[in-house]
Amino acid sequence: MLAGHHVLHTLQNSPTGSRSVLVGVLNPAATLNSQAAMTQHLMYTEPPPVPEGAALRLYSCPICPYAERVRLILALKNVPYDEVNIHLSAQPDWFTTRVNRYHEVPVAEVNGKLIRESLIIFDYIDQVFGGGSSLWPTDPYLKAKARLILTDFGNNFIGAWYGMYRGSPDQETLDNFKRFLKELEDIIQENGNKFFQAGDTPGAVDFLIWPWFERIGALKLLNPEATTFLSESNYPILFGWISRMKEVEAVKRVALPDSAHFGFYKGYVGTGQHDYGVADISGKGITVYAKEK
């Protein structure tokens, strides 16, 4: 086993008590990124075996919205897990050769078996740790409609969203972005005006879409043009949904503040720097596995 020690985080205020999350290995002798305010601990070794008590290992990234999808359902289902953060611009060889040759997070490791892609991992956790209750509609047609929302979201929204982060998109992209925001409002309205799936609590679609809207404050800070239209007055139903999601316990346990998202993307867009230390809201440091340059 590596020199170092596991850091055990216990998160209170969950519906069923506390949840333990075992994350990485924090080695006092690890090389530090001097630009990360001494909170991004870079590890150039392989992680140790999955510790006892962890139901699975999640290969993740502190700032990645796709990885956040998985952390959300793990928090919601109170699943104890071991988290290994990967430096996305300096991925270690052991990760790209043995964990995911496509060089992407998240990846879940369950009893030595690997599952990649955020939606597939989300579904696996929903089925295995759901306790007989799923976040998806039970009606096959409604479930199909929910899946189509996610397909349209990926095809029409995510690309434009990142374009907004990087600067001013062309007018066609901007128009399509605004149109899809209205379509999202229509979906919420059709389902009872609260969430993307009918009912008084959020469903799978809400959690799978949420990570991008958690970053809405950072987007407006990075791109002032977004403040001219991305407002509650223009999208009251959508912003009402955002307010309700912020009150969900699993979201509270996983979410990062606007300052963290802004700090990361400002550095990334400006210089290409990956400063995961901005996600260290606990003050205990963020351990990230990287390839030594």
Image (tube, grey):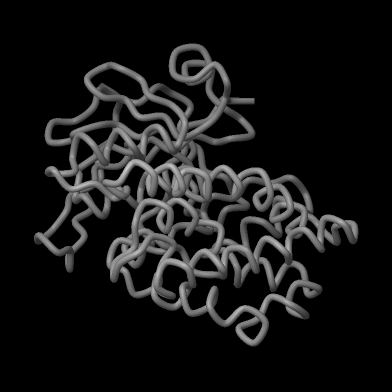
Q: Quadrant of the N terminus?
A: top left
In this orientation, which residue lies closer to the viewer: 14 or 259? 14
In this orientation, which residue lies closer to the viewer: 73 or 288? 73
Q: Is residue 219 left or right of residue 49?
A: right
In this orientation, which residue lies closer to the viewer: 5 or 67? 67
* Above-or-below relation of 143 to 104: below
| Displayed quadrant of residue 253 | bottom left
Is residue 128 in view? yes
* Above-or-below relation of 114 to 185: above
- The residue that appears at 21% across and 50% down in the rendered structure is 77
| Displayed quadrant of residue 199 | bottom left
The residue furthest left is 17
- The residue that appears at 22% across and 20% down in the rendered structure is 111
- The residue that appears at 37% across and 34% down in the rendered structure is 121
* Above-or-below relation of 219 to 104: below
| Displayed quadrant of residue 267 | bottom right
Horizontal and vertical percent for residue 269?
A: 75, 52
Horizontal and vertical percent for residue 227?
A: 73, 78
Is residue 64 in view? no
